Image (cartoon, grey):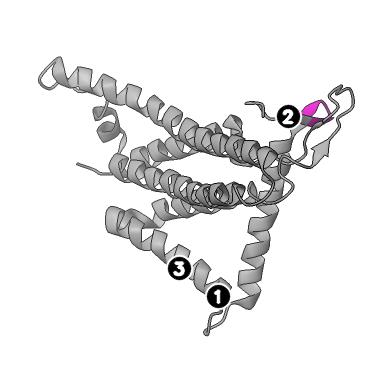
Amino acid sequence: MNLAPEILFKIAGFPVTNTIVTTVITDIVIISLVLILKFTISLYPKIFQNIMESVVEYFYDSTKDVAGSRVKFIYPWVLTFFIFIVISNLMGLLPGFETIRFHPIGNTSHEGVPLFRTATSDLNLTAAFAVISIVMTHFYAIKYTGVKSYIGRFVSFQIFPVFLFVGFLEFIGEFTKVISLAFRLFGNILAGEVVMGTMSSMVAFGVPVPFMMLEVMVALIQAVVFAMLTMAFMNIMTEKH
């Protein structure tokens, strides 16, 4: 498996990779689930509605316990990141990923390239999510704490030059958050795909099952970690004191 996603074809000069195809499919799955829930919602919920309500309530309650009244603007981001990432991660475990091959025009490889690849195994996507998470965190920090308080986090002449140096470290820390969020998700999912691909090529039945169960746990944990870190960052940056 390559670190970079494979290009399948181009549209008006824009390269369409296998991770872009999977991202579109993930979007379709999420929209379909929302529509199913909308038209089947009932006062006497069935299994699917119970699962969805449990997920929604868990993240709402967790965010409210941490952020209080700020839950109204933090919670939507937390839930959105979790839903997309966990569905994308789990889709990578479906039959056909990395095994269904596509032969792009001009590609001389006999095996071709994978038609489907987990969207979160693309650093472009995980980095985009990380940037969105941190940019919105700083947007809310300015909006709810004020420009003066926000700048004071990074520039302070109290106990000069100690606080000024601390502010500089805080500023650098915001960039490391992007790197940390992006590479943590990308690395774990990519490593999982490599392990699954290696084990499946060695033994088709039996042995890969424990590894698949492990990857299910990783898929869930990484989605929760990304969502919870976003919640923590937004909560810390929007604290007025």
| Amino acid on which the number 2 mark rests in the picture | Glu
Residue 144, quarter of the rendered image: top left
| Residue appearing at x 64%, y 50% in the figure | 91
Eye-nearest disc, 1 or 3: 1
Amino acid identity at mark 3: Ser
Q: Which mark is residue 54?
A: 3
Query: Residue 37, how many percent across, how many down?
Result: 61, 70
- How many marks can you see? 3
Q: Whole-Å distance between the Cαs marked 3 and 2?
A: 37 Å
Q: Is residue 13 visible?
A: yes
Residue 47 numbered mark, or none: 1
Q: Secondary structure at mark 1?
A: helix
Which label is found at residue 95?
A: none
- At a point 30% along the width and 43% down the height, the residue shown is 238
Q: Is residue 174 left or right of residue 37?
A: left
Query: Do we see residue 131 in this rendering?
Result: no
Q: Quadrant of the N terminus?
A: top right
Considering the numbered disc 2 on the image, is that residue within a helix, a strand or a loop?
A: loop
Predominant secondary structure, magenta span: strand
Percent x, y for residue 227?
A: 43, 47
Magenta stretch contains residue 179:
no
Q: Residue shown at 56%/39% (left/top)?
A: 192
Residue 29 in the image, given as x and y percentages of width and height: 67, 57
Q: Amino acid at mark 1?
A: Ile
Mark 1 vs mark 2, CA separation in Å: 38 Å
- Quarter occupied by the C terminus: top left
The tag earlier along the polypeptide, 3 or 2, is 2
Tell me whether the residue at label 1 lies in contact with that at label 3, contact meaning CB atoms closer than 8 angstroms. Answer: no
**Residue 177, picture quadrant:** top left
Residue 6 numbered mark, or none: 2
159 lies above or below 145:
above
